[in-house]
Image (tube, grey):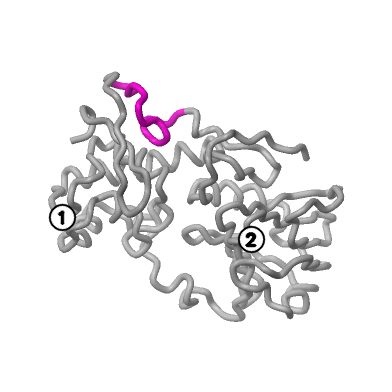
Amino acid sequence: MGAATNTARPPTMPELPEVETTRRGVAPHVERQKVTAVRVYDPRLRWPVPHDLPSRLVGRMVDRVDRRSKYLLFRIGAGTLIVHLGMTGSLRVYRDPPARRPHDHIDLEFANGVVLRYHDPRRFGAMLWSPRTVRDHPLLVALGPEPLSPEFTPQYLFRVTRSRSAAIKLALMDSRVVVGVGNIYANESLFRAGIRPTTRARRLSLARLTRLVDAVRATLDDAIAKGGSTLRDYVDSDGESGRFQLEYYVYGRAGEPCRVCRSIIRTVRLGGRATTYCPMCQR
């Protein structure tokens, strides 16, 4: 499976669409398949790869591959292999794997001949084992609802933002409010909803939050359909780049004309992150 061509933009952490694209690419190859070998070439990820991971996995079958926020969850009996891609991680599916490259850290081999290879230049990702249900795992226990789930409703968002004086963009990126909406998709969703990112969350009416929930869902659905965004390091399980970055309205477009009204896109910093918006389309 061929190498991908990446764009020259600065790196960014894979967000929900990129992780969901990876899940959909990986799942058909490994679900209902038995793990035959685990090769850990470098355990030094964000948290060390457990030394007993091979003995935990070899000989066991992957029942299914789920996603919670930006975590991939390989369900294996009562336990779960938790995978996070960090800033630069990727999982690639091979049937005839090439020679290891620098930063290829882990291979999972399966009975059907598939090799799932974890590649991570910055080593900010993780591969951890949870012997029981992950619902109460420290990495997952405090997470809010999934943005594409029935629980993420305008009424819910209205209720949880009444006491928040922070900007709505920061609330949208708070994983305790809703998971998986990172910098790219928060910018794009707020543009589609016509809401300025600096607006205080508690000042937004139910009607405006209804537009925002719809915009978040539509933005994420569009991004998933196009394989996510490739800014530098992200490729999917086949090594292909995402295409959603070709359709950005505001993210990364500071100083350029708005695609809708031709006003110049502006930028501010919120929570240490670049935040772009149209001064005319977003109020």
Q: Secondary structure at mark 1?
A: helix
Which amino acid, mark 2?
Arg
Going 73% across and 52% down the picture, which residue do you hit?
29
Instruction: Determine contact: label 2, label 1, CB under 8 Å.
Output: no
Quadrant of the rendered structure where residue 251 is?
Answer: top left
Label 2 – label 1 distance at C-alpha: 38 Å
Q: Secondary structure at mark 2?
A: loop
Q: Is 13 positioned to the left or the right of 265 in the image? A: right
Q: Residues within 10 Å of mark 1 (few under 14, many from 20)?
A: some
Q: Which residue is mark 1?
A: 202
Q: Quadrant of the N terminus?
A: top right
Q: Is residue 217 magenta?
A: no
**Percent position of residue 261, x then y:** 27, 20
Q: Earlier in the sequence, mark 2 or mark 1?
A: 2
Q: Quadrant of the C terminus?
A: top left
Q: Is 230 positioned to the left or the right of 273 in the image? A: right
Q: Which residue is mark 2?
A: 123
**Percent position of residue 252, x then y:** 42, 34
Quadrant of the rendered structure where residue 179 is?
Answer: bottom left
User: Which of 157 and 198 lies nearest the eye of the viewer?
Assistant: 198
**Percent position of residue 47, x then y:** 60, 72
Helix, strand or loop: magenta stretch: loop
Which stretch is magenta?
Answer: 247-260
Which amino acid, mark 1?
Arg
